[in-house]
Amino acid sequence: MTPTRREFLNTTAAVSLLATSGLATKVQAAEDKNVNTAFDYQHAPIPLPFDTKSLKGISEKLIQSHWENNYVGAVKALNLTRGRLTQALNDTNSEPYLYNGLKREQLIRTGSVVLHELYFGILGGDGKAGADLRKKIAEAFGSFEMWEAEFRKIGQGLGGGSGWVVLGYNHTLKVLENYWMADHSTSPPRTTPILVMDMYEHAYQMDYGAAAAKYIEAFFANINWEAAAQRF
Amino acid sequence: MTPTRREFLNTTAAVSLLATSGLATKVQAAEDKNVNTAFDYQHAPIPLPFDTKSLKGISEKLIQSHWENNYVGAVKALNLTRGRLTQALNDTNSEPYLYNGLKREQLIRTGSVVLHELYFGILGGDGKAGADLRKKIAEAFGSFEMWEAEFRKIGQGLGGGSGWVVLGYNHTLKVLENYWMADHSTSPPRTTPILVMDMYEHAYQMDYGAAAAKYIEAFFANINWEAAAQRF
Amino acid sequence: MTPTRREFLNTTAAVSLLATSGLATKVQAAEDKNVNTAFDYQHAPIPLPFDTKSLKGISEKLIQSHWENNYVGAVKALNLTRGRLTQALNDTNSEPYLYNGLKREQLIRTGSVVLHELYFGILGGDGKAGADLRKKIAEAFGSFEMWEAEFRKIGQGLGGGSGWVVLGYNHTLKVLENYWMADHSTSPPRTTPILVMDMYEHAYQMDYGAAAAKYIEAFFANINWEAAAQRF
Amino acid sequence: MTPTRREFLNTTAAVSLLATSGLATKVQAAEDKNVNTAFDYQHAPIPLPFDTKSLKGISEKLIQSHWENNYVGAVKALNLTRGRLTQALNDTNSEPYLYNGLKREQLIRTGSVVLHELYFGILGGDGKAGADLRKKIAEAFGSFEMWEAEFRKIGQGLGGGSGWVVLGYNHTLKVLENYWMADHSTSPPRTTPILVMDMYEHAYQMDYGAAAAKYIEAFFANINWEAAAQRF
């Protein structure tokens, strides 16, 4: 069963996390304004939008660990890193190239947080794409099958390492296309991600070992295409 | 003097380039539809939106070379790489990890094309930010000066290597912030770039040698803030 | 029990692999000369130098999968990629930047093959460093404990992603120091690796999930310090 | 004229640099022992081993700027970064992933220092390879011409960005081969570099603008093959 936001905020672990970090009040604050502040904004983790027991071929244990350790861990690291930035910016001993070490960490964690939210956000479905979306994809790729073949091939090539596969719309090129991304900090600029597949080994090793192809199968079976469609 | 698009298409070099690659008809085609096709779309280079003689502290020779060699070169490489994708996708001998070699090149060139267009697109101005934009930036960063200090510091840290500095709006985090980017393939996902500064050495070596700080000075003096404002 | 090289070559899987790729004769050939040829050399996988059942806290299933899928997989990919190089070098249609896509794959796989052999090569021990080595390390790092603290800290920072931790001797700087490495293609030049710890998630997820710290504990308990000492 | 080490240490600029950083005494110290200490070692810049006026097609201005700004700059940054490590290691507030930000900077600067010394170390020659070396290279690559064709092709593919081309001997694979390297932190492990070509834009932009091919020509004309031969 998918918890609502309120239910999520009431679960013990989440409350404890939010309380110790003072995130609870910030969640509300963030919802009240359009732009958060660059240096002191603290992001609050978003709960999984589906019942962790409901995925086909992806175990509750794995998806729970993925959310808690990799995603919430990234949120905490992003918040902590952001907190160091003002301090370092005002430190006259902080050489620009060392400052950029913090900015790099901020970028990696930003990528991890955003991509994980986009990934969890399109899981929990039945894997069946609606006619509209199939048509849009087919128009851009020649056929829906050709899109799927490329998306899967990129994923297979990332097996055994880290990275993401993203179907996204590039606003400069006006192209809907698949992107290979080496890690959290890799991304095409000015692009709206539609469908996002995590290929870090933590997304499948616990269930499938090195068999990345089986995980890709499971990923496709769990896509929530309605959620993906709303990103256009 | 800034050439219009039509004037640009009539210049000898551009016509020759577009003719040999069959881009001319595609330019028109691209303008007629909202989504280009993933595998056979060919991007046409965008002319510089300012008179190449008009920049303060950035020579005509450098900006012309930057546009022709680095930007148009990236467009050509992107088009050529895209052309190889269908062929490789259908090649049963093409291992997924080798296919991803092409996808990586596509990503790098996509980043180069998009970021260069965003960079040239905000040059040619008087460097004075309007009150509205200054206020928006000040709200996000504490003060306009704090934003500028960080933006410049990131740039200085990138001196002697490659990379980009981007002021962008992250749609997931709802934060307007500065990003350090290591190369064309690095980028925060789901982010709208507002102000983009090229820190590859081809952006300044010809005029300033290793003195990246002087180039950053020149960059700030030439910002077209009206153009930047339209990206919000 | 550790198979000898001959025993290894006699196991069914290995023989089958070597036979289909014609590697068997090349293994012998490689042992007979000092320099293999750049374009047509085919590397043969090295068997694990310890009994896969003997590791403390690292399961047979994991270490077997690590060897077969990640290491032998890398060997095969390296061999296949190398095979494509001559062909691409002679192809006048192969743009240099696309050729470099193959060279990048070659570099990544080279790193994976070399680092995995160095990693497996120092496992299977009792985790106790001899007095000589402890002294050398203490001299370079202030104390053996300080070396270990840094080595572990780098490892912990790599948890949840990919990368390597390497204690190595840099021949230019004449320094024995620890290196953080982001992936297979990252490495300090002109450096002899002594102790190598794999921090890709396939090195621990199957046994420990996201608990990278427990894996680091297990890694230290299994170090074969005599083997490491021979690398000085 | 090539200054000897002593002469170099007597030049005003060098003395001033070494004096202010206390490097002068450390140079001597480093020459007296085999292993420097990991945390407090300070590297001293090596003077150029050739007359800066003597290169063919590479201007005095460029090579001087390359040495001073990019190489000596890297030495200073490496020394400063190293100084921060002990402090950060003992700081209980320093999260491992932030500590790794410093280690990454250390790695990048280590690569830059080592590779620049290897690069400058094989310049200043007449570009003519001796019969012995030609034979060794021919044996490894099929022919000397094939080696050169690949080395140049990799370089051309790196034009407009950053990176290195390295002919090196891999001690694990026992292969003499060419490597593509994306930046200072990229490198094949356990490899002895023989011939090293800098493809960062600061190596040629000042003399050749974007014409990387002309720089590659000049590089080949200035190779000191005797120096390269000594690295085998």
Image: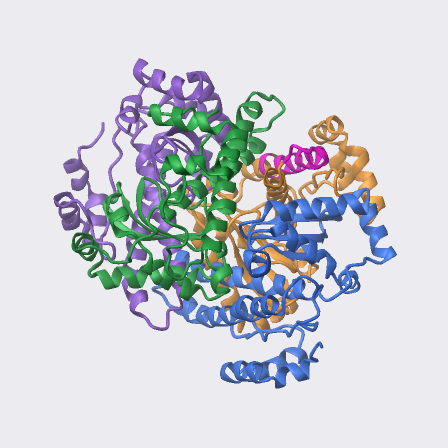
Chain colours: A green, B purple, C blue, D orange
Specify whether residue D71 is painted magenta. Answer: yes
Would residue C71 be found to the left or right of residue D91 on screen? left
Quarter of the figure with the N terminus of chain C: bottom right
Can you tell which quarter of the image residue B174 is in? top left
Q: Position of residue A157 (x, y in %)?
A: 42, 62
Q: Is residue D149 visible?
A: no
Specify whether residue D118 is painted magenta. Answer: no
Look at the picture and state if B63 lies above or below C52: above
Would residue B179 be found to the left or right of residue C11 on screen? left
Would residue A30 be found to the left or right of residue C181 on screen? left
Nearest the viewer among A56 and D226 is: A56
Q: Position of residue A128 (x, y in %)?
A: 25, 58
Nearest the viewer among C3 and C45 is: C3
Residue extending furthest right?
C131
Nearest the viewer among A173 and D117 is: A173
Residue extending furthest top?
B131
Would residue B43 be found to the left or right of residue D206 on screen? left
Main secondary-structure element of the magenta-colored stretch: helix
For the magenta stretch, what is the residue range? D69-94
Q: Position of residue B40 (x, y in %)?
A: 22, 57
Quarter of the figure with the C terminus of chain C: bottom right
Q: Is residue A35 visible?
A: yes
Q: Identify the residue shown where x is 52% and y is 38%.
A: A105
Q: Identify the residue shown where x is 34% and y is 38%.
A: B116
Q: Identify the residue shown where x is 56% and y is 50%.
A: C182
Q: Position of residue B123 (x, y in %)?
A: 32, 27
Q: How many marks?
A: 0
Look at the picture and state if C71 lies above or below A182: below
Q: Identify the residue shown where x is 73% and y is 29%.
A: D21
